[in-house]
Amino acid sequence: MIPRNRLEGIIRHFKKTAVLVVGDLMMDKFVWGKVSRISPEAPVPVVEVTRESYMPGGAGNVVNNLCSMGSKVLVSGVIGNDRIGEQLVGALSARTAETRGVFVDQSRPTILKTRIIAHHQQVVRFDKEVKEPIKGELLDNIINYIKESLPRVNALILSDYGKGVITRPLLHKAIRMARQSHTPITVDPKVEHFFQYKGVTCITPNHQETGQALHKALPDQTSLVEAGKKILKRLNSQALLITQGEQGMTLFEKNGKVTHIPTMAREVFDVTGAGDTVISVFTLALACGAKIIEAAHLANYAAGIVVGKLGTATTTPEELMDRIKER
């Protein structure tokens, strides 16, 4: 077991680090209400709306998580020329993130995911998005921003939701630049790009994505371990961290060590954004000089906290400290 004072020391160092997040920015809209009847027009519930709220989503939620942990954050991605885009940049700036690397794409709207929630249950979700890969000036702007920013940060996160920002040309250049500057680079992967992340420090897929990447079912821990070893070898990464929901997570290291970490969640209300919390805290710990196994344990504690909250949630250094003390 990792000593508590060691984990606490890493957490105290969070505020002294800087992380660059590059990826698919989006806005999460929540429409809250209650249901008391079924529509006479169709067999669907009628939601009486009581309030609406907005939160940065996708790569924006990674930014949100890092800011909540006290880190300095730089962010790069694209938005549309619209009110939601302005609102999203404003929300990220209000969290003290540097948004100079967010560029306007005139050909697409800002990604908006709207969730209708009644009595703490999601009734339906609808998405407004264009997923065409970025290219030309937009691609050049983001690559140039990464090049300019790497000397100022301690780690790079690629938050890939498959919405067009993380393309093969961007991946190859970002990975090469990060490796040249000895900057840890982690990826929240998209299945379609899975084996294009060669050479990154670590990727953090969930159990389902891991199986999809290899086109096979992973019904038990034995099959998951076999798959993890195969993926790690193909990617030539330092580590692979597979999240498994209520089963916790399994860490694969390049030296051949495999460690299963049981979940620290007490109750699970909502897993929305839990993967963003995992990669945020894991990467932040690496940026502080933590060992990979230490970073994984901290990410597991953080995930256990956020799944006990409703909606796209984050945690704080204080909450993380308290949870570690209770182990």
Image (tube, rainbow, N blue to C red):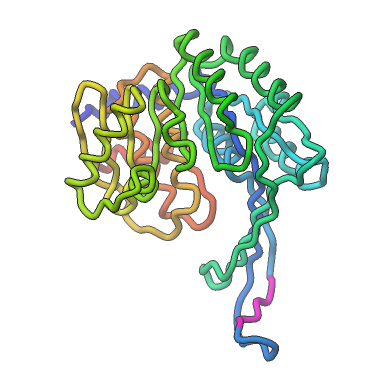
Q: Quadrant of the N terminus?
A: top left
| Span colored in magenta | 44-49
Q: Main secondary structure of the magenta part?
A: strand
Q: Quadrant of the C terminus?
A: top left
Residue 42 highlighted magenta (yes or no): no
- Residue 59 lies, in percent from the top left, at 58, 38
- Residue 70 lies, in percent from the top left, at 53, 29
Which residue is at 56% across, 28% downward?
Answer: 168
Which residue is at 28% across, 23% downward?
Answer: 6
Outermost residue toward the bottom?
40
- Residue 193 lies, in percent from the top left, at 48, 36
Marks counted in the figure total 0
Which residue is at 17% across, 46% downward?
Answer: 222
Image check: 5 left or right of 308? Answer: left
- Residue 25 lies, in percent from the top left, at 64, 39
For the residue pair 248 and 252, the one nearer the viewer reads as: 252
Image check: 30 left or right of 253? Answer: right
Which residue is at 19% across, 26% downward?
Answer: 256
Seen in the picture, residue 117 relative to 255 is either above or below; the reply is: below
